[in-house]
Amino acid sequence: MAPRPRPTLRNSFMRNWYSVEAIPIYVIIGGVVVGASWFLGRLATGPYVVWSKSNPTPWNTIKPDEGTKIMEINQKFDKRYVSSLNVSS
């Protein structure tokens, strides 16, 4: 009887990590990672994110008569706060 050949690294990998039952798990996890990366990249490059330190405390430049919210209910302000950055959305 001839001795059995040692399993190669590829055969060992295929037997332990590439079973047919595991393919849907890999596809789902890969999809989740790609989707999360896309979403975080989209959030990080949005118009309301500022990646500069030119004004570390922007809340100190808001006057008492300026409204800063997107939608103000039952509040009347004389002016609307406009960021010092020229951001186009």
Image: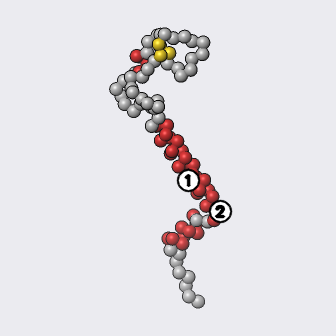
Task: Looking at the picture, tell me which residue is in the foreground, 52 or 75.
Answer: 75
| Residue 74 percent location from the top left of the image | 60, 12
Label 1 CA crowd tier, 10 Å (few <14, some 14–19, many 20+): few
Q: Which residue is mark 1?
A: 30
Q: Mark 1 near mark 2, Cβ–Cβ under 8 Å?
A: no
Circle 1 or circle 2, nearest the eye: 1
Amino acid beneath label 2: Glu
Q: Earlier in the sequence, mark 1 or mark 2?
A: 2
Which residue is at 53% across, 22% downward?
70
Q: Secondary structure at mark 2?
A: helix
Q: Which mark is residue 38?
A: none
Q: Is residue 44 above or below residue 78?
A: below
Q: Position of residue 53 (x, y in %)?
A: 36, 28
Residue 9 point in image, percent of width and height:
50, 71
Q: Quick one: 23 or 43, which is closer to the camera?
A: 43
Q: Residues within 10 Å of mark 2 (few under 14, many from 20)?
A: few
**Relative depth, front residue between 17 and 70:** 70
In this view, the residue farthest toward the left is 54
**Cα–Cα gap, marks 1 and 2:** 15 Å
The residue shown at (60%, 16%) is: 73
Indicate the quadrant where residue 87 lies: top left
Residue 85 to residue 4: above or below:
above
Picture disc at residue 21: 2
| Coordinates of residue 12 in the picture (x, y in percent) | 54, 70
Q: Callout 1: helix, strand or loop?
A: helix
